[in-house]
Amino acid sequence: MTRSCLAAPLLAASICCAVCAGGALAKDTGYVFVSSENDNAVTVLDGKKFSVVKVISTGKRPRDMRLSPDGKSLYVMTSDKNQADVIDIAQLKVTHSILAGKDPERFVFSADGKRMYATNEDDAHVSVVDLASRKIVANIPVGEEPEGIRLSPDGKRLYVASEVANMTHVIDTQTNKVIANVMVGNRPRRLALNPDGSEIWVTNELGGSVSIIDGTKNTVKATVEFQPKGFRKEEVTPVGIIMTRDGKTAYVTLGHANHVAVVDVAGRKVLDYILVGQRPWGITLNRAENRLFVVNGRSDDMSIIDTATRKVLQSVPVGRVPYGAVIDD
């Protein structure tokens, strides 16, 4: 057998490995994506060293972000362009945009991944977008300045927080109709659900609290208030919230109070306050839930927290007025 014949299968194997490796890079890259409202860009960080890999230009005022159901794309809501920009993660570039109503801020995908629901602050409604046709197929009227939006675990209910109405709306996803309006605290912003959807936690920015809604009765069943030392009540402005997958712990960003609250969900008790940067709003956990990423809008950085020790490991510059973070892990 000639040397070229021996080399052929080795070369084919090498090409196969290279192709497979290249495909793997398109998902679970470890990248940390941070949207910056004043830079009109998404900063991509290496997930280990947190060095900048790339800055991706987007439409004006990028805010909420989510990975696509297949994990291959990152959707970025660009509020001042009235659209979602879609970033291909393998290429790290915007490939196309989808209209999402007037002044869209936050959004979720439907349970089957075929639709997108976006809150439209200026129009006081939720846009229902068909992702295949890239068209808005329905508008759901809600209270003024809707922001936070979450889907129930079974995909049958949407929960939308209306800042001006001090209300959380419950929407039936089959009919696109509001089936309940729940009065919560002053200026509700964002939401988190426990694993079975029996509780909906709503942050009240000007109320300095979280309202806990009973998912069956659609009534407020409890309230958690925050008061870190050294801050006046009016300085405690909860906005961002995330809950661990087991539903045991909630993390709440306290805005002007420059802290993150660690809350025991079952006991309705604040366990700790963690000092971070200035005006923390955006918050997310990595897949292992051993790191908490907190985006600080006024100090233009991101605090990375060890959830076991509840200590900030490092702060990373991430652009002007960062809004939120997504981790591709």
Image: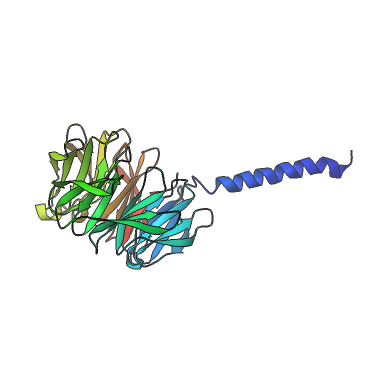
Residue 152 found in image quarter = top left
Snapshot colouring: rainbow
Residue 275 visible to the viewer: no
Left or right for 321, reference 226: right
Residue ID at (65%, 46%): 18
Residue occupying the far front of the picture: 175
Image location of residue 185, percent across then percent down? 12, 49
Q: Is residue 29 above or below residue 94?
A: above
Q: Nearer the viewer, residue 231 or 116?
A: 116
Image location of residue 235, percent across then percent down? 14, 55
Q: Is residue 40 above or below residue 126?
A: below
Residue occupying the far right of the picture: 1
Residue 152 visible to the viewer: yes
Location of the C terminus by quadrant is top left
Residue 224 found in image quarter = top left
Residue 10 found in image quarter = top right
Q: Nearer the viewer, residue 107 or 323?
A: 107
Location of the N terminus by quadrant is top right
Residue occupying the far left of the picture: 233
Left or right for 254, reference 75: left
Image location of residue 193, percent across then percent down? 26, 40
Left or right for 265, reference 90: left
Number of numbered markers: 0
